[in-house]
Image: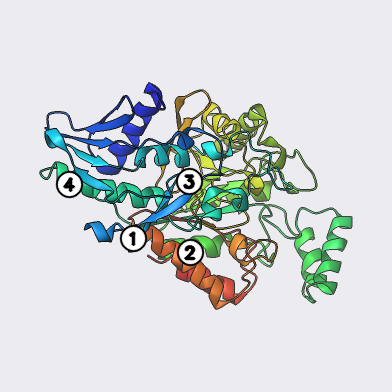
Amino acid sequence: MTFTPASLRWLETILEERYGLRLTLREEGQELTLALPGAEGRIRFDTLKPEFHQSRSDFPCGRWDAAGEGFTPALGEPLPTPAMAELPARMVEQAGQGDVVIHYDILGLTYWMLTRLEEVGRTDLDDHGRFPATSSHAYEHEYLERPIVDEWLNLLAQVIKIQWPGVELKKHQFSIKVSHDVDWPSRYGFKTWTSLLKTMGGDLLKRRQLQGLWVGPRVKLNSGEKLHPLDPANTFEWIMDESEKSGLTSAFYFISGRTDPGKDSDYELEHPAIRSLLHRINERGHEIGLHPSYGTYQAPQLIGQEFSRLKSVCEKEGISQSEWGGRMHFLRWEQPTTLQAWNDAGLNYDSTLSYADRPGFRCGTCFEYFAFNPLCQSALNVRVRPLVAMECTVIARRYLGLGASEEALNKFMELKEGCRKVGGCFSLLWHNTEFETQWKMDIYKRLIHL
């Protein structure tokens, strides 16, 4: 056995959300079978791969020309085949008893990618304790920037229509979700005078910005009940304006703890200016969420405490929401510790799972889905909302380093179009502090328009 009963039931929920059908999965010997209750025939997967039930990245990958067998690949390109380098003469064949056989472990790949089993227990981590893109199988075999799970499930949908031509499959509409980690709601307002002087010195000497010399003290002295309008980090009204023009809801994720003073922010949720901001976001119909502090990703109880603090402050402002989610600070993540912590804290979704060092599809998908803990083999209530791109991942020198260039714009647009082609969601993170140039403002506006 490679799949457990719990993992098969979870995969059935994934397929039901994707296709709108109640399909059943069963492992029989060395095969996995997919059936439609009440209908004749099955779809059989006869090449199950043990690699998809292991935490490793050191296995081969080929490319299958789906178009050459009469199928329509979602991206118009051959499909990557992780764990299979030598391909059969035909990938999909009619078999006896009215069955169709697929000689690739599509659902094993789906399980391995969506559960992030590849990352469990890994020690090849970066300086922030993160599993980096450059250690992943997807990066090594050049499919990180493709929603590989969605591509294969699109192919499986075509096989389902061949096997059961009378079924109606669920149709998905391309969408966009924008979110903003509020690391620094104010550039100057919450700093100590010593810290403010250092920031102003950096503005002058490193960034050649004279404006900070007079704006900094003014913002600090006048950041009382509200954030100062001259504060360069106070872009919240502009962000909400742009989202509303595009018919979108922005999600703003706030830090509510301090486990590392050097990496967490300098504001307190209870400050009148922050409470006013929370109220304003809610008043305009946008979303408030959690951005757990730097040291929480291996500390489930702290994530729960920081969520409770955020909800408490919101309740005092009369803020209620139907769902609560957010994202880990610095995208720090330990699988499945952090995932289980979000679930146990009662959060509805997490949107951490993208890599900091490279953009793309860490989970192989741009569709939201219910999480699964691969260690204890249990389905969770929290949903994974995969993040496709963070602005600094593409632009910043410390990561991909494309800067303010046409190449950067093209990279964002390629990822967005990949989501569009599979009918998924382009999830974009853009910090409120990253609108300091007209180029960034313009590119952001282009990206959030459908």
Query: Callout 4, which amino acid?
Result: Lys
Label 2 SS: helix
Q: Measure how far apart labels 4 and 1 are at the Cα level.
A: 19 Å
Label 3 SS: loop
* Above or below, 434 relative to 17: below
Of the residues tagged 2 and 4, which is closer to the observer? 4
Q: Within 10 angstroms of label 1, few (less than 14), some, or many (20 or more) residues?
A: some
Q: Residue at x 82, y 72 (%)?
A: 206
Disc assigned to residue 161 = 4
Residue identified by numbered label 2? 241
Left or right relative to 360: residue 218: right
Query: Callout 2, which amino acid?
Result: Asp
Label 1 SS: helix
Mark 1 and mark 2 lie on one chain; the one further toward the N terminus is: 2
Mark 1 and mark 3 lie on one chain; the one further toward the N terminus is: 3
Q: Which residue reaches farthest right?
A: 194
Image-quadrant location for residue 108: top left
In front: 443, or 90?
A: 90
- Contact between labelled residues 3 and 1, with CB atoms less than 8 Å apart: no
Point out residue 87 in the picture as x, y percentages from the top left corner.
36, 50
Of the residues tagged 3 and 4, which is closer to the observer? 4
Query: Callout 1, which amino acid?
Result: Lys
Disc assigned to residue 421 = 1
Point out residue 4 in the picture as x, y percentages from the top left corner.
40, 23
Taking the image as drawn, is residue 178 in sight?
A: yes
Q: Measure how far apart labels 3 and 4 are at the Cα level.
A: 26 Å
In front: 7, or 239?
A: 7
In front: 124, or 167?
A: 124
Label 4 SS: helix
